[in-house]
Amino acid sequence: MNSIATTASGGDTETTGVLDAVIVGAGFSGLYQLHALRDRLGLSVQVLEAADGVGGTWYWNRYPGARCDSESHSYCYSFSEELLQDWEWSERYPGQPEIMRYLNFVADRLDLKRDIRFNTRVAAAEYDEARNVWHVTSEAGDRFTARYLITAVGCLSTANVPAIPGLESFAGAWYHTGLWPHEGVDFSGKRVAQIGTGSTGIQAAPVIAESASHLTVFQRTPNYSVPARNGPLTPEFRQYVKDNFDEIRRIMRSTTNGHPFTIADRSVFDVSPEERLGIYEAAWETGGLRFRAAFRDLLTDRKANDTAAEFLMNKIREIVNDAGTAEILAKIDHPYAAKRPPIDTDYFETFNRDNVALVDVHADPIESITPAGIRLRSGAEYPVDVIVFATGFDAMTGTLTRMGIRGRDGLTLTEAWEAGPRNYLGLQVTGFPNMFTVTGPGSPSVLCNMPVAIEQHVEWITDCIAYMRERGIERVEALPESTDRWVEHVNETAAATLFPEAHHSWYLGANIPGKPRVFMPYPGGLARYRAICDEVAAKGYEGFEFS
Ligand code: NA7
C-alpha cells in the first residue's frame, strides 16, 4: 500500500506514491465504495468530496420539505447486519436531516472520514497511458495519482438554473433547491415565486406556503402526484423490519425498481373497470410509489397507462376547488410515470390556500426577470421578494462531463459523449481504462431505489478489481463493440416502454438546452440488469479487455 502526503491546506498536496483508487464523491456510493475497497480488499483509497461533509445529493438539497420518495426501511445500506440493527428510522419516508444523520452514522461507524478529503472539488482527471495511472487534480491544485478512478458523483448533483434574462438584475434573493443555504431561508412576510413543479417543487410548495405571505407557483409542465402518506413508524413496524430484513432484501433485489414491494402480476385489462377503480383507490390510499406497482403494464401499454392517468387527473379535479386552477394542474400530456412520478404531502391541497396562486408558463412563458420579479411573454408581471428555482439538474451526465475527465489519447469525456452518453453496462466508457462510474448513465440508477442500485454497482466494481489483482491484471477497458451493443440494448429496451413518450423529461436530457436527447438510465429493471452484470463477470468479464 502507498500512503499520501497529509498536508491539508489547498493546493500543496501531492501523492507521494500511487494510490490504488481515487473515488470522487462521499454520498451513498462513495462511502460504500471506500469501505469495500479499503476494508474488504485492503487497498489505499482517497475519497475527494466537494462539500465539507458526507451526504452527496442530500448534503446540498436542504430545501423546505426535502424528503426521499423511497421508504426509509429500504433507503439504507443492506450489506451490514450491524448497521441495519443499530439504526432506527422515525418516519415512513426519511427527511433530508435524518438521511444526513444516517450517512454520518455510517461514516463514523465504519471510520470512513479519515480517508475523505472534504472541500475538494475535482477539476481534472487525466489518464496517463505510459504509467497506466489516473492523475486527479482538485480546483485548489492538489494532485492525486491512482490506479483506479471511480466516480461516485450521483445522478442529480449539477443544479440547473435556467438562463432567464435579467436574473442578475433581480433585487430580491434567489435560491436553487439543490444548492440550498445551510442556515435555511426565512420566508415569513415574503412574496415568493417558485419555478418548477417536478418532484422537488411538489415537495417544497406546501412547506413554503405555510410561512410565506404569498406563493406563486410557475408551472411549465403539469405533473401527476400521488400522496406519500408519510407518518411516524410504529415500534412494531420497526421490529418487523429488523426481524425480516433478509426477506425485504430479497424482494428489493428481485424486483424491477429495487423497492421493498413487488409489482402486481396483473394487467390493467385483467380486471373489470369497477375492480380497477377499486385497485387504484386502494393504491391511492396506500400512497407513494406503490401506486405505480398496482399493475404490471402501466409503463408498457399506453391504453393501460391511460386508465391510471385518468384516475390521477380526476383526483386533481376533486381536490382543487378552483376549476380553472384544477384544469391547469390536470392538463397532463405524458403517460403516468414516464417522467419521474412525484409523491407529495398536500401538494394539490396547497392550491386551495388563499395565499397561493398558480401561473401556467406553458401558455405564457417566462420572458425575463426584472428587478421587481417575473415577467411573462404577455407582459404580465409578478412582483416578488424571493425566487425559488426548483428547476432540477443536468442529470446523470452533467457532473461527469464537467469534471475535466480525459482518457486515452487525450480524449475528453465530453467529446466521447457529444452525441449522448455511451458506455458498457453503465460502468465503463471505452477509451477510459480503469475508470468506473457508479450508477452511471446506461445503468438502472434513477429508475430505482438508489441504495440498492448503488450496492450492486459497488460490489460488482469491487469484485472486478479483486479479480484483476488476483491475476496480476493491471488494466481493464470496455471493448468498443461491447459499448455499441449495450447502447443499442438500452435504446431498444427504452423503445419498448412508454418512457420516450415524455418528450420533456430529464431522463432524455430534454430539460437542458442543447443536451442530446438520449434515454439515459437503463429501463430493463434492476433484477434483469443484475443478472446481466453477474453473467458478464462469470464469463471472465466478457466484453472487457484486460491487459
Ligand atoms: P425536475 O424533475 O427536472 O423538475 C424541474 C421543474 O422545473 C420542471 O417542472 C420543469 O418544467 C421546471 N423548469 C425547468 N426549467 C424551467 C424554466 N426555464 N421555466 C419554467 N419551468 C422550468 O427536477 P426536480 O428537482 O423536481 O426533481 C429531480 C429529481 O430529484 C426527481 O425526479 C427525483 O428523482 C429527485 P418542465 O417539466 O421541464 O417543463
Image: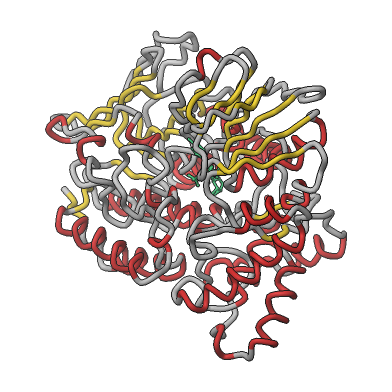
Tally of numbered discs: 0
Q: Position of residue 200 (x, y in %)?
A: 61, 43
Q: Nearer the viewer, residue 201 or 409?
A: 201
Q: Residue at x 68, y 55 (%)?
A: 326
Quarter where residue 437 is shown: top left
Q: Is residue 383 above or below residue 458?
A: above
Q: Is residue 332 above or below residue 270?
A: above
Q: Quadrant of the N terminus?
A: top left
Q: Residue at x 72, y 59 (%)?
A: 227
Name the image colouring. secondary structure
The outermost residue toward the front is 378
Q: Nearer the viewer, residue 93 or 77?
A: 93
Q: Residue at x 43, y 53 (%)?
A: 457
- Residue 414 in view of the camera: yes
Q: Is residue 485 left or right of residue 97?
A: left
Q: Position of residue 367 (x, y in %)?
A: 48, 29
Q: Is residue 71 left or right of residue 391?
A: right
Quarter where residue 62 is shown: top right
Q: Nearer the viewer, residue 325 or 209?
A: 325
Q: Nearer the viewer, residue 223 or 200?
A: 223
Q: Residue at x 43, y 27 (%)?
A: 163
- Residue 80 in view of the camera: no
Q: Is residue 544 left or right of residue 376?
A: left
Q: Position of residue 282 (x, y in %)?
A: 74, 75
Q: Position of residue 234 (x, y in %)?
A: 86, 60
